[in-house]
Structures are given as C-alpha cells and as structure tokens.
Amino acid sequence: MPSSIAPPDHLVSEVAALLVSALNLDMDPSSIDPDAPLYGDGLNLDSIDILEVALAVSKKYGFQLRADNEDNAAIYASLRSLSAYIAAHRTA
C-alpha cells in the first residue's frame, strides 16, 4: 500500500533527477511538479516509461516495483507519491 507519509524534499528532487536520467527527458528535474500526474496530462509517461522507471528505482534503491502490484495507480500517481513509496520501501 502506498505511504501517506510525505517524503523528504531531497528525495523528491533525487527521484525527479532519476526520472529525467532514466527516460532521457529534455527537461530540468526541478521543473517537474511533484503533484502532477506521471501518466496522461502531467509528465505524460506511458507504460514503457513506467517500466524504465521501475528498473531505475530497483537499481538505485534496492527493491522491486512489481507490474502486478494492485497499488501501482497510487504509487505512480505523481512524483511525490512515487517518492513516498520509495522512502517507505528502500533498502539502499
């Protein structure tokens, strides 16, 4: 289940940089709105992008984001929600 605890600001910035790097986005990580959707109208990621993000997260933070997790819609809802999930589950 996604964490309702707010992630530290430095982690949100770190995850934004990870998204930009993993997806080769042509934008500054600080320009990503932490509360904007990652899918659709926000960052406009698709399912392939999310797989790339999951791989990058597993390498950097030491845990797996699973495709069959019933909470994925909430986990990937925004940069802040993804960061909160990482803060609660990271091993590295």
Image: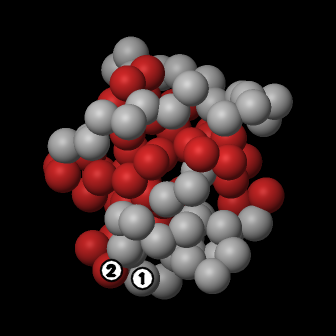
The N terminus appears in which quarter of the rendering? top right
Quadrant hosting residue 55: top right
Q: Amino acid at mark 1?
A: Met
Bin the neighbour count of mark 2 within 10 Å (Cα to Cα): few under 14, some 14-19, many 20 and up: few
Residue 54 at x, y percent in the picture: 62, 41
- What secondary structure is marked by label 1? loop
Q: Residue at x 55, y 68 (%)?
A: 37
- What secondary structure is marked by label 2? helix
79 lies above or below 56: below
Residue 75 at x, y percent in the picture: 57, 43
Residue 39 at x, y percent in the picture: 66, 67
The residue indicated by pointer 1 is: 27
Q: Evaluate if marks 1 and 2 touch, with contact meaning CB atoms under 8 Å apart.
A: yes
The C terminus appears in which quarter of the rendering? top left
Q: Residue at x 56, y 77 (%)?
A: 42
Q: Residue at x 63, y 82 (%)?
A: 41
Say left or right for 84 vs 62.
Answer: left
Measured in 3D between alpha carbons, the distance from the residue under mark 1 to the one under mark 2, in whole angstroms, is 7 Å
